[in-house]
Amino acid sequence: MDEILSRELIENSEKEVIKNLSRDIRFDLPEKVLQFGTGGFLRGFTDYLIERANKEHLFNGSVLVVKSTPGSAANFARQDNLYTLNIRDKDINEFIISAPISRVVSALDQWEVLLEAAQNKDIQLVISNTTEAGLQFTDEDLSGSQTPNSFPGKLTTLLYKRYQALGGTAESGWVILPCELVVNNGNVLREMVLKLAERNGFGPAFTNWISDHNRFCNTIVDRIIPGKPDAGQQQKTFDHLGYKDQLLLECESYLLWAIEGDQQVRDALEFARIDKRVIITSDIEPYREQKLRLLNGTHTISVPLSFLCGLETVHQAVHDPLVSRFIQHVMQEEIAPTLEGISPEPSTYANEVFARFQNPHIEHLLLNIMFQQSTKMTLRNSATIQRYFERFGTAPRHMALGFAAYLCYMQSPDPSVQDDQATRISALWEGNSPETVVRQAVEILKLTADEQQAKNFTASVLPFLKALLEDSARNTLETFLNTNPATP
């Protein structure tokens, strides 16, 4: 089979499966969205919603995607920016050909194209998923013609170009939806943009326009999208579809997008009407806390231990007799109790998340989850550790073991997995005792609230780290579980 997904293929194919999957696809819609990120998550989440809305004539707009990282976007060009989304659950196996992306532009090589796009009146929305590490402040000079290094720098420059071109009118402001898993991500991004604007001397009129007419919305996103299936499953899918698709994605059916906003935001997000699981509300805190701590936090604290136990995917982890017990206990006994008072009931939500982890059709690679693992450890788990201390007066022991496994893994992290702090954490092992490694890592990652918590957490982590250094992770975990009778 040599056919590759493309516009020509779906317009000319006589195959019934391709006709069915491409029904109601709309091309050549005006660009209404500027999206930072070519990864699978946004394509399987926000772009999925936009595609559905376009087919129902509810949005009628396409997405200009910004590629900020080095590397080729040849697969997008080769496939006319089309891709297939495979939604898989226990009783669901649905395929969708998606066409919301108009073009993919490299911020590194085509910056002038993006500066021109910033002046397009039709573009009203900005969506981003640059990971937690991408939503960091970098004090940089934005006065030149070169591409800014950071995402906030790029956004500030594009906003300034739009302000200059369109006269700073109220109508020219953007609704900005960061999807990075950072607490109050909209507020954080707005403050970075305002600081960069001030430091670059862009003037008070510009900063007033940002504050008054651009809406930076806090958001929380929830859908498990592991990305491309393994080679075997990929070939089976190609055989079923009758074409090849190098942008093929798999995801679960569950979806939640909570957006902090008012009627103005609702009016701008026309595509949100396509799905009741997109919730625009004045307070997203309950949704954010539940998802960030119980789903993402569980991933982050359990993945290094799962990996050291010889596992490769989340599905394997939640079906492993030892690792699954660890995961259930850390969710129910250490994370959920720190979320009391949040609705829905945390333990119930934890059960739902564990069931989603068990989806037999989602092969979520542990190494993919460990992307920017160090930053995630801080943002997803520090609040849980601190709240557990406040409530129980002691360290959460399962999280201590999970952190010990992280430190053990960071002695020699997989070079294919990006982690901006990997070099710094790995260097702690050079000539230092395990106690020093733990103490300094806890300090670097800001896991605890004060000196006493840091001392107690270090004391809890240290024996687990020594055990992992002396014995296998599986034996260490089995011994740990056998000495904790409360474990499910």
Image (tube, rainbow, N blue to C red):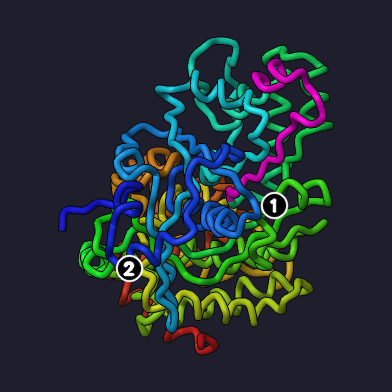
Relative placement, left or right, of 43 versus 385 is left
208 above or below 467?
Answer: above
Q: Is residue 176 magenta?
A: yes
State the SS at label 2. helix
Residue nearer the viewer, 458 or 243: 243
101 above or below 474?
Answer: above
Relative placement, left or right, of 329 versus 451 is left
Residue drawn at x 21%, y 64% is 235
User: Residue 220, percent across and down?
Assistant: 65, 57
Q: Is residue 484 magenta?
A: no
Name the mark on residue 270: 1
Residue drawn at x 82%, y 56% is 282
User: Residue 248, percent across and down?
Assistant: 34, 57
Residue drawn at x 52%, y 47% is 375
Q: Farthest left residue?
A: 1
Residue drawn at x 62%, y 45% is 178
Residue 343 showing in the rendered view: yes
Location of the N terminus by quadrant is bottom left
Q: Which residue is mark 2?
A: 17
Q: Amino acid at mark 1?
A: Glu
171 above or below 200?
Answer: below
> Hey, which quadrant is residue 144 in on the image?
top right
State the SS at label 1. helix
**Range of magenta residues:** 160-180
Relative placement, left or right, of 146 versus 182 is left
Residue nearer the viewer, 272 or 111: 272
Residue nearer the viewer, 254 or 120: 120
